[in-house]
Amino acid sequence: MTRVTVWNENRHEKKNPVVSDIYPEGIHGAIAGFLKEENHEVRTATLDEENHGLSDEVLNNTDVLVWWGHLAHDEVQDEIVEKVQQRVLDGMGLIVLHSGHFSKIFKKLMGTSCDLKWREADEKERLWVVDPSHPIAEGVGEYIELEKEEMYGEHFDIPAPDELIFTSWFEGGEIFRSGCTFKRGNGKVFYFRPGHETYPTYHNEQIQRVIKNGVNYVAPVNRKRPVYGNAQPLETIAAK
């Protein structure tokens, strides 16, 4: 059983009735709900909880952390970001959703600005599967079509992904690398673009399938992180 923590700012839900109508249990509640269908052990955490809900105990008992943030990236304590980064390097999986591209943790792991173009214009988005053999695309057709979404456009200032699974086309003409994986230390990171708060994107069954697949993909492997530093020889070194 994979232990999943779904983290969300939970700010839009408190400020905007459109968002609270779409996600009455919060975005974190909606995501946690469909992940429980996979028999994962799922908990939620939000920004305004003590330690943002990410105490050492929670992090040490999390196999996969799902992250949604937007309004309050700067309010996330640097100390917590450092701890999340260390857990990823030690093997914890991380899924960063939508506007989490600007989160402190994603920018820290990427080492770039993670900036992009954006526009809110109720545009159609078509996410094309460009790596059909990838496990994250399992159960998805050639593309996922969303009637309305926020546009994210290239250039997306991230390092070249280890794997590119989805590329989006938007009604206004832009394209975007919408499904990317990265390896960091022992851990894996999956960035997945859709999920603007005023659209019911996380109620879409195909989007849910991708996130479910993503949890399985980034879940840690059963091995310890390599030992670094000065090392004793494995064999006898012949005298020179």
Image: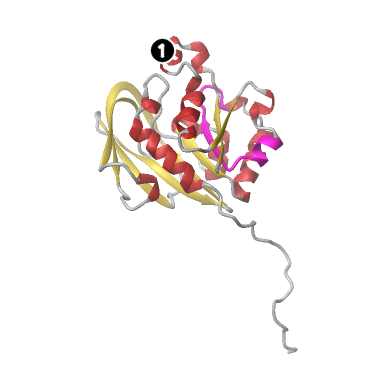
Compared to residue 161, the image places residue 108 above or below, namely above
Question: In x, y percent, where is residue 210?
Answer: 39, 39
- Would residue 77 be seen by someone viewing this image from the given angle? yes
Going 65% across and 45% down the picture, which residue do you hit? 86
- Residue lying farthest to the top in this orientation: 17
Observer-nearest of 234 and 71: 234
Where disc 1 sits, the SS reads helix
User: Please, is residue 24 above or below residue 118 in the view?
Assistant: above
Check if residue 68 falls in the magenta segment. Answer: yes
Residue 46 position by quadrant: top right
Q: Residue at x 24, y 29 (%)?
A: 171
Q: Residue at x 70, y 36 (%)?
A: 57
Looking at numbered disc 1 in the image, what kind of residue is underneath it? Answer: Val
- Write down the region rendered in magenta: 57-73
Specify whether 198 is left or right of 5. left
Q: Residue 224 appears at what percent x and percent y? A: 64, 57
Look at the image and tell me whether residue 82 can be seen: no
Name the residue carrying label 1: 18
Q: Is residue 222 left or right of residue 121?
A: right
Looking at the rendering, which quadrant does residue 53 occupy?
top right
Of the 4 image quadrants, the one containing the N terminus is top right
Is 89 inside the magenta-drawn segment?
no
Counting from the top left corner in percent of width and height, residue 216 is at 47, 45
Quarter of the image for residue 126 reads top left
Query: In this rendering, would 200 be left or right of 1?
Result: left
Question: Where residue 156 sits: x, y (%)?
Answer: 40, 39
Compared to 88, does 11 lie above or below? above
Image: 236 above or below 35? below
Q: Residue at x 44, y 52 (%)?
A: 162
Mark 1 nearby-residue class (10 Å; few <14, some 14–19, many ≥20): some
